[in-house]
Image (tube, rainbow, N blue to C red):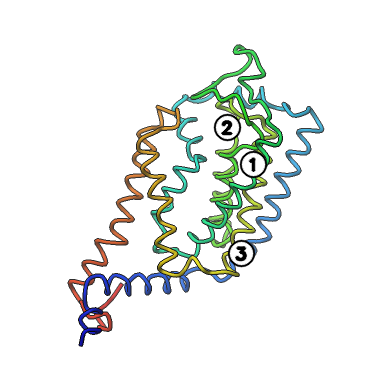
Amino acid sequence: RQMCIRDRSWVGFWWRDLERALQQGQCREFERSPGGARWLAVWGGACLAAALGLYLAGGYHAAFVPINGLAAAGPDWAWEWVTVLGDDRLVIAAALWFTRRHPRVFWALCVTAVLGYGFTHSLKPLFLAARPPAVLDPGDLYVIGPGHRKTSFPSGHSLTASAFCGVWLYWRAGWSWRVPLVALAVMVAGSRVVVGVHWPVDVAVGLFGGVLAAWLGVTLSRRWPWGLRPGVHLTLLLPPLLMALHVLSDDGGYHRAAGFQVAVVLIALLKAFLDYLWLPWRRWRRAPDPDSEDWAR
């Protein structure tokens, strides 16, 4: 009798509801998206070849001036909106939009994030490369937003964009998904040169690092599906929630994109509230018995 009462409580129902959502989310994703690994391999190889070609053709600072000159072709606010899409805080917070519906993708992104962090933060202190504002005269470049001067290699924003898009590229089949994902990551990476805080070699290596992290993240997450357990899944929600609060209090120096970032975070938080609290509560009110046939999703 006590077990029955406990199972019919809101907390018991909510836990069982989450377990079922994670199980359905596992079945919803492709076990292996056809050609996903091949796409990542080609994309990563192209990024590495681009980085090597740029360096051999013109050195570490190759192709900066013409790409940075694109800043004059569009309004500053537009470039700020694009470049903040590579901010790891915003990307991690935005993941709240799909964490419950696509738990396998979320788990792969968590593993990818750890690997990507290790990639960038092992190379940045090793090379200590100066950024364009620390090398060029103010009249030779166009800077939008904060003019960072240190730890240029590799580009963290580029890695974040390619890692996020790379994980989704693996799981989503079809050119209609994969081409836009690659284009989005490349556009975000290119914006780092346009806003004047990275060299093209930085972003090419950053893109490669993100693709590599995505491939490893998907591979490891499929082999060790710990993140699909309810307790682990809930724990993994803490970083996105903390990053959401961070974005709401700090726009990263891109003031013209502050409203855009706040809107993305608030929508993600609202979606998480609906998915994890409001909709389960409504299901509990409709069918408090976890074993009821009316316990529909």
Mark 1 is surrounded, within 10 Å at the Cα level, by few (under 14), some (14 to 19) or many (20 or more) other residues, namely many
Residue denoted by label 3 = 220
The earlier-in-sequence mark between 3 and 1 is 1
Relative side of 77 to 86, left or right: left
The amino acid sitting under disc 1 is Gly
Q: Which residue is drawn at 63% across and 31% down?
A: 151
Q: Residue furthest left?
A: 285
User: Quick one: label 2 or label 3, which is nearer the N terminus?
Assistant: 2
Task: Classify 45 as above or below 174.
Answer: above
Q: Do the residues labelled 1 and 2 touch (CB within 8 Å)?
A: yes
Q: Is residue 207 left or right of residue 274?
A: right
Give how far apart the Cα atoms at labels 2 and 3 are.
Answer: 30 Å
Please give the label number shown on residue 192.
Answer: 2
Residue highlighted by disc 1: 206
Residue at (58, 53) in percent of width and height: 166
| Amino acid type at image mark 3 | Leu
Residue located 44% across and 29% down the image: 254
- Image quarter (top left, top right, bottom left or bottom right) of the C terminus: bottom left
Q: Is mark 3 on a helix, strand or loop?
A: helix
Q: Where is residue 19 in the image (x, y as percent from the top left)?
A: 38, 73
